[in-house]
Amino acid sequence: MKVLHILRNPFSYAVFKLKSITKGSKLSKVWVEDHSPVLVNLRSKLSADRPFDGLRIGVCLPGTWESFMFLSTLEAGGASLLYYPMFCKSEVGLELLKSDSIRLFDADGSKKIVNNSDFIHDSTAFFGRLVVHQQASVKGIIEQTASGISVYKKFETKSFLHQPVFDLNSSFVKRVGENEMATGLGLIEALLKLHIFLPSKKVLVLGYGSVGEGCALYLSRLGCRVSIYDIDQNKVVEAENSGYEIGELGQLLSQTDLVVNATGSFVPALDDKELETLKCGAILVNMGGTGWNRQFFNDKRKIQVGDWISKIFLGDSKYIYEVARGLPVNFVFASGTDTETMDVVFSLSVLALEYLVDNYDSLPKILQPIPEEIQRKHFDLVARFSNRKDLIALRKDDNENTFN
């Protein structure tokens, strides 16, 4: 067993040892394999074809069993993996340690990852910033998050990209299958662990992209009174037409029991003044991006009132709650996105990486959608093997260009 950098950093070790709060929620590798039929099929095929032989692939993903299935599939294809688990369940980390082809790093080791990787599978552009800053000779990148795509768009505008970057987030299976239909379930799982009565709660969702839309849908179906705030007026109109309350941010915050950030932006959605307007007892949870300016809490009195729950006093008698320290609550406080959905998303990532390896030198050095031919090939696999048959029907009913 290798001595890994991640185990020498106290904070990273604490995250590495993170366990689900709810007893009985641990799943075994066997369970996850049984519910990842597309990746299992690809793993068998890649073990014969070995398309990644001799390649080093840097990966930035939460340390879940779903990520393990993705990594093991790339490993079967011959890849050596340099992996930074943003959040890691201890049982997953222990399984990863058994592999000779997967090296674990903490955040401090990320420079080593980008400087020694041929290709990168990124999240929140965590590696992408370093690739640009270090001018690393990475041949191609896949980015899976909306927040990360916004960073790569800025890099493209400034002509900082020297390799093709595939936008996984805009693909149908990611945008609809995960973001709209599945991510919100992780939020609900996390909120149920707070042991509060959700129906009738006044909830404000910040950001009405695909994640915010999915969160709002599940919350409203549980009986929450949902309001939406977005800086994009087209999104505001869309939210209002869907039956959600809209209004000025300050007014909405003063009436809200629960704030869900789903902006996907690295610009804090709530600044100091706006945090001051929160009603007493309001709960803050984050689903993506930088939800609020956490430095505002530095000089405030705080007490821990539960695992990953802080009670923060804004005055002598006024207080709010912050869940998961502003980190994505669906990963830190719950189990993330379900296995069957991530089987579909990560299997598209595998096919996209295979295509990138074969064609990186002929692809334009810009941010671009995953090629339509790869998405069609992927849907053939989904139709044959996946448990998410609903996505096939949705694709047929979708009036937009499904693949772009």
Image (cartoon, rainbow, N blue to C red):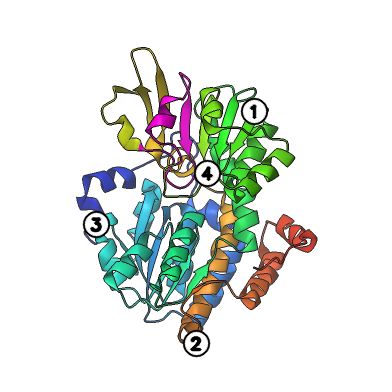
Residue holding disc 2: 362
User: Is any atom of residue 93 visible in this view?
Assistant: yes
In this orientation, which residue lies closer to the viewer: 165 or 30?
165
Q: In this picture, is 175 found above or below 204?
A: below
With 312 as the anchor, is 249 left or right in this view?
Answer: right
Residue type of the residue flagged with mark 3: Asp
Dot label at residue 262: 4
Q: Residue at x 61, y 48 (%)?
A: 182
Residue named by callout 3: 108
Q: Is mark 4 on a helix, strand or loop?
A: loop
Task: Please state, as top left, top right, bottom left or bottom right, where the N terminus lies in the image.
Answer: bottom left
Closer-to-camera residue (195/356): 356
Image-based side of 296 in relation to 346, left or right: left
Q: How far apart are labels 4 and 2 at the CA level?
A: 36 Å
Label 2 is placed on what type of residue? Ser
State which tag comes first along the sequence, 1 or 4: 1
Q: Where is residue 213 in the image (x, y as percent from the top left)?
A: 63, 44
Q: Mark 1 and mark 4: span between their CA atoms?
A: 17 Å
Highlighted magenta segment, given as a residue range: 269-293
Tag 4: amino acid: Ala
Instruction: Specify few, some or many for label 3: CA neighbours under 10 Å numbering under 14, 14-19, or 20 or more.
Output: few
Per the model, the C-alpha gap separating discs 4 and 3 is: 27 Å
